Image (spheres, rainbow, N blue to C red):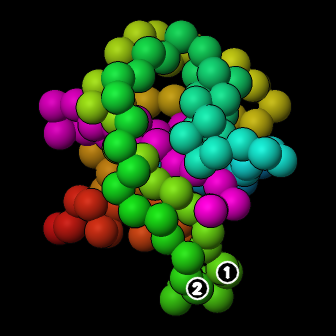
Amino acid sequence: MAKSSKLVASKRGRVLLVRRRRDRRWMFPGGRKQASESDKQCLRREIREELPKLKLGRLKLWKAVKKKNRSTGRKMSDAIFIASKASGELKIGDKREIDRAVWRKPRGIRLTPTSRYIRDKLFPK
C-alpha cells in the first residue's frame, strides 16, 4: 500500500490541479494516508477536505508508484487514481494547505516532482 494517494481528473483536454500555499507549486490533488485507511479512502477524504464541492465519479487505480524520483532523489509511494468523471465548484476547503484549484493544461506550469512524473507518464508531449 502507498503512503499517499493522488487524483487525476481531466475534462476537455485539461486536468484538475491545486496549488500548495507553502511553495506555490501545482500538483494533482490528494495527500497522505491516515492509519487504517485504504488508498481509495485516503483519496476520497483528501478531496472532501481540499475541494468539498467536487463530485467524483468512479475511481480507478491507474498505478501504484514506488520508486525514487530521478530529479529530486525523493522516494515516491503514491497510489494514482483516475476519476471517470469530476464536476462541481472548485471551492477550496483547507485554505491553510492549498490556495487555488483550476482546470488547465498540465504543461508550462511549476509542478511538484510527483505531479511532473504523473504528467509525463499520462500526458506525454
One can see residue 104 in this view = no
Element at badge 2? strand
x and y, in percent, of residue 112 in the image: 56, 61
Task: Considering the whole magenta stretch, tell me its main secondary structure.
Answer: strand
| Of the pair 110 and 74, the residue shown nearer to us | 74
From the image, which quarter does the N terminus lie in? bottom right
Q: Quarter of the image holding residue 104?
A: top left
* Residue 26 position (above or below residue 123): above
Image mark for residue 74? 1
- Disc 1 residue type? Arg
* Residue 54 position (above or below residue 31): above
What segment is highlighted magenta in the picture?
A: 1-18
CB atoms of marks 2 and 1 within 8 Å:
yes
Q: Quarter of the image holding residue 19?
A: top right
Residue at the spot 17% in from the left edge and 68% down from the top edge: 125
| Of the pair 11 and 37, the residue shown nearer to us | 37
Q: Is residue 12 left or right of residue 14?
A: left
Residue 107 lies in magenta, yes or no? no
* Residue 67 position (above or below residue 14): below
| Of the pair 2 and 23, the residue shown nearer to us | 2
One can see residue 36 in this view = yes
* Residue 115 position (above or below residue 66): above
Count neighbours of disc 2 (C-alpha within 10 A) and say few if under 14, some if 14 to 19, many if 20 or more. few
Residue at the spot 61% in from the left edge and 69% down from the top edge: 77
Image mark for residue 90? none
Residue 7 lies in magenta, yes or no? yes
x and y, in percent, of residue 38 in the image: 64, 45
x and y, in percent, of residue 55 in the image: 44, 15
Residue at the spot 49% in from the left edge and 71% down from the top edge: 65
Query: Closer to the N terminus: mark 2 or mark 1?
Result: 2
Please give the residue where the numbered disc 2 appears in the rendered image: 68
